[in-house]
Image: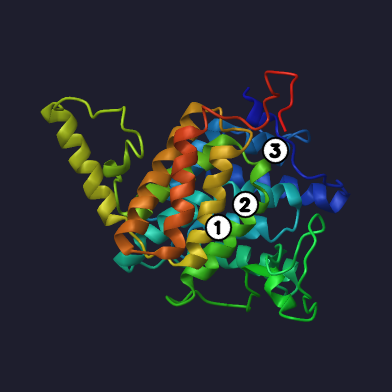
Amino acid sequence: MSDDENTTTSTVTFTPNTSEKIQSALQSLTTIVNPTLSVTSSTTPLSILNECQIYAQIAALLRSPNSGAGDNNLCRWLYDTFQSNVADLQLTILRFLPIIAGVYLSRVAERKPQAGFEAVLLALYAHETTTRAGEPVTVTIPDMSHPSVYHESKTTVNKNNATDRNIAVLSPLLEPHGTVRSTRRARIVGVAFELFYSKISQMSIAPKIDFCKFCKIWAGQNGDMYKYFEDEDDEEDEEESNEVKIEKDKESEEIKRGRVPMPWELLQPVMRILGHCLLGPNNKNTKLFEAASEACRCLFARAMHDVNPNAILPMRSLLRLSKNIDEFDATEPPKTDVISL
């Protein structure tokens, strides 16, 4: 079992009512996914969460051509289970958000009914709206117009001048939505990703890798021109074989078909999740790190293609981090006892 699989979930008080909800949810899951799955009194959502076989079966169902419809049993189970308000069960549902959002956004252009996926996304959005109580998510940043406590200033600064400049809004206040319209889609999915990011330290590696793979598809760019980004020593390999070229052409065509609009309200939480994949405790996992690096390269190519100034600088920073992360580790102690001032 990997270190990531040992992550703990938030503490849940197993009252009789909570225990009934958990058992009912798991029994319902067995009728949809795996009838041979044995559910006992000791079975917990965490054990299901870390079951690779169950994850693979649910992921396959979510990717199937008929998934996402309003009468889809799996979507109904995902919706009802999240609405149970049991922390462990909600965490279990969040694990499948990258696939739900990935398949949903990739099919928008096909104009297929996806009421099942939309119901799940709206449930996540409503949960976050209730949690925030109508307040935006903000962060206080230093005001560069004021001197720091370590410096003296000869000029008198009006303390009442533009104090609002110290507050940056990470996520604006949320309005309740009962349906998913084209003008609201990016905001609703983006808020769902913000919820996913708030629980990302409790997620296993598999959903993070799925997220990175969908980022590459959403970008609609293969990013090959930035494969050796700011690295003059590396040179591209010699001519590839025809089979490799054909495989790359197929992949490129699939990426172009999956291209979706990437407004800032969707791109911002996407970059936060990618930053965790690159710098978080699981970044030593080769598959996750490579998937995140490739996603950053593709999204940077998309930002350059769209000439999106808000996205170019942060995506460039993430791309540079993906190239230099092995050379520098801020957590490593210094190799000398001498401190230079």
Q: Is residue 334 visible?
A: yes
Q: Which residue is mark 1?
A: 269
**CA–CA distance in space, label 2 to label 1:** 7 Å
Residue beneath the point at 32% across and 38% down: 227
The amino acid on which the numbered mark 2 sits, given as a three-letter code, is Tyr
Q: Is residue 67 visible?
A: no
Looking at this view, is 144 or 62 the one in front?
144
**CA–CA distance in space, label 3 to label 2:** 18 Å
Q: Do callouts 2 and 1 mark residues in contact (Cβ within 8 Å)?
A: yes
Residue beneath the point at 53% across and 60% down: 268
Q: Which residue is mark 3?
A: 46
Q: Give the structural element (helix, strand or loop) at label 1.
A: helix
* Quarter the N terminus occupies: top right
Looking at this view, is 24 or 169 the one in front?
169
Name which quarter of the figure residue 331 lies in.
Answer: top right
Tell me: 333 left or right of 237: right
